[in-house]
């Protein structure tokens, strides 16, 4: 209850200072619109905003899905085959020196103005964090678990799937959280470089036409979408690792027969 | 056996009579755990030259149950599934009889009502009891225990020693420990591992049935002698 109240007060304070800046500087509406005007635009242009938001959301979700699956598969292969690890891991690390944003125009050229190039951007931008987090998780299985699994007669496959993979789930969860927070960046940058739909396109277009209020409204929708995405992924990650919540709260729970 | 270019032991001859509890006493770093891991087939980084003979003529590989100092319960599995871990890892699934057997073993370690809890909800002593149930579930001809009770407080340790002595009676057990009292309470035979490269002392066979009382005069006398022996080594 207190937390909700605090969040409301912070939000109200920020909006108030925004309005104060507008009043004090007497900035024209095409330079800095006040919060009320942005809200009004948000309501008036709601169907338009939602149409573009839908496209961006689809791009983000597809990118998240593809990037996560590819990252997970890469991490599993790297952890399983030592030869692959020695050849591919240096390439992967060096490839991170190339800024993904710099690739956006080329992706546009190859995959066209449609959704494919934006999905590819989002996929590329989250692929490495997910791979790195999963791979680290798979590598850092406590050696005692593996020794125990071997005395219990577990083969390599059973060790990987039943011991190393579950032990890596907390690290995978962290990778997913990072992915959820950077995937929207990938999609929006992709839309900036070239597209005819999506919130990124709408923002750029509104900016060029001095419709700064519409730009802010689109930004607001994007922020809400990114936050919702992060919290859903956080919830999924916690569902994947229920034992982590228990171990932190067990100290206060005590024994109940 | 060599480990990281350093000779741990040489010409070591250890006999484990079947159905008896043998304990090996020694200081930290003398090579106790290496010896145990060698028998369990998990001493990867070691260079081993030697042979293991079993009285039934079959290889020992894969027929040892290992219980470590840490309980090594997998935190994402329930207590029951941790006991069933061997079956889960080997076959991928468990039969009804195996579940019944696991529940029976849990009731023997007095944790039947905690079967569906996760390990994080249990205390240290309870967790080690689950590890004991898991070891019993494996039902292997040789049980190897590596300081299984050393992470527990004194009272919990005594209770668990009694429980282990009761449940592991008639089994072939090899226990590694640095606590003479623990060895004297539980074992049929005690040997001290010392020196560099390490050698085994002659066997001490305490009288009476395990678990022996902590105030047993003979136990106390032997304890003093063993402590002195280990202290000499340290000096």
Image (cartoon, grey):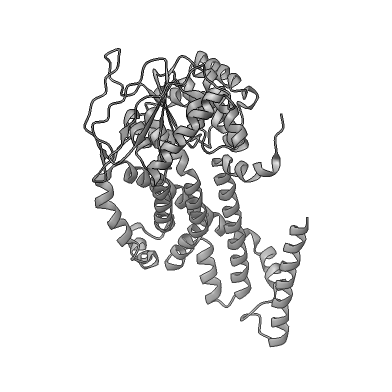
**Rendered image quadrant of residue A42:** bottom right
Residue B52 falls in image quadrant: top left
Total marks in image:
0
The percent coordinates of residue A44 (x first, y second) are 68, 65
Q: Is residue B3 above or below residue A217?
A: above
From the image, which quarter does the C terminus of chain A lie in? top right
Query: Is residue B148 visible to the viewer in this orientation of the structure?
Result: no
Residue occupying image coordinates x 40% and y 45%? B234
Q: Quadrant of the N terminus of chain A?
A: bottom right
Q: Is residue A14 above or below residue B172?
A: below
Foreground pick, A106 / B7: B7
Check the image and name the residue furthest to the left.
B49
Q: Name the residue rendered at 63%, 58% in the picture.
A: A47
Q: Is residue B91 left or right of residue A176?
A: left
Q: Position of residue A91 (x, y in %)?
A: 28, 57
Front one among B224 and B48: B224
Residue B121 seen? yes
The residue closer to the viewer here, A126 or A90, is A90
């Amino acid at each position: 209850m207190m937390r909700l109240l605090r969040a409301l007060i912070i939000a109200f304070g920020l909006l108030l200072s925004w309005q104060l800046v507008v009043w004090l500087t007497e900035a024209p509406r095409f330079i800095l619109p006040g919060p009320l005007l942005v809200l009004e635009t948000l309501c008036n242009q709601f169907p338009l905003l939602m149409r573009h938001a839908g496209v961006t959301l689809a791009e983000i979700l597809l990118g998240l899905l593809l990037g996560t699956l590819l990252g997970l598969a890469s991490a599993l292969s790297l952890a399983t085959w030592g030869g692959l690890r020695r050849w591919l891991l240096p390439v992967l690390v060096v490839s991170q020196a190339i800024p993904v944003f710099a690739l956006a125009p080329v992706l546009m050229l190859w995959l066209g103005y449609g959704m494919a190039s934006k999905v590819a951007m989002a996929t590329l931008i989250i692929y490495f964090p997910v791979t790195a987090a999963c791979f680290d998780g798979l590598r850092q299985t406590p050696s005692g678990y593996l020794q125990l699994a071997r005395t219990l007669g577990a083969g390599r496959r059973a060790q990987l799937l039943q011991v190393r993979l579950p032990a890596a789930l907390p690290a995978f969860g962290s990778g997913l959280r990072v992915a959820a927070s950077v995937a929207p960046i990938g999609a929006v940058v992709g839309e900036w470089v070239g597209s005819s739909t999506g919130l990124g396109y709408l923002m750029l277009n509104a900016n060029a036409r001095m419709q700064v209020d519409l730009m802010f409204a689109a930004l607001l929708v994007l922020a809400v979408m990114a936050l919702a995405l992060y919290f859903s992924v956080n919830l999924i990650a916690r569902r994947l690792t229920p034992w982590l919540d228990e171990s932190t709260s067990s100290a206060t729970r005590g024994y109940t027969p | 056996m060599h480990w990281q270019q350093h000779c741990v032991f040489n010409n070591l001859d250890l006999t484990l009579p079947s159905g008896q509890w043998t304990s090996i006493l020694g200081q930290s770093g003398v090579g106790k755990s290496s010896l145990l891991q060698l028998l369990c087939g998990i001493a990867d980084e070691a260079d081993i030259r030697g042979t293991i003979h079993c009285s039934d003529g079959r290889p020992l590989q894969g027929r040892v149950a290992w219980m470590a100092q840490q309980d090594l319960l997998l935190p994402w599995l329930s207590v029951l599934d941790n006991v069933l871990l061997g079956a889960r890892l080997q076959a991928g699934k468990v039969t009804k009889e195996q579940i019944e057997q696991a529940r029976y073993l849990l009731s023997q370690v007095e944790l039947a009502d905690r079967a569906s809890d996760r390990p994080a909800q249990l205390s240290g002593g309870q967790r080690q009891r689950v590890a004991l149930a898991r070891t019993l579930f494996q039902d292997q001809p040789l049980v190897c225990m590596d300081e299984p009770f050393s992470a527990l407080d004194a009272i919990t340790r005594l209770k668990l020693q009694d429980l282990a002595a009761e449940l592991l009676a008639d089994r072939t057990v090899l226990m590694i420990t640095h606590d003479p009292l623990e060895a004297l309470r539980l074992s049929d035979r005690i040997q001290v591992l010392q020196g560099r490269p390490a050698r085994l002392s002659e066997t001490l066979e305490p009288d009476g049935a395990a678990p022996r009382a902590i105030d047993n005069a003979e136990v106390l006398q032997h304890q003093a002698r063993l402590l002195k022996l280990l202290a000499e080594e340290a000096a």
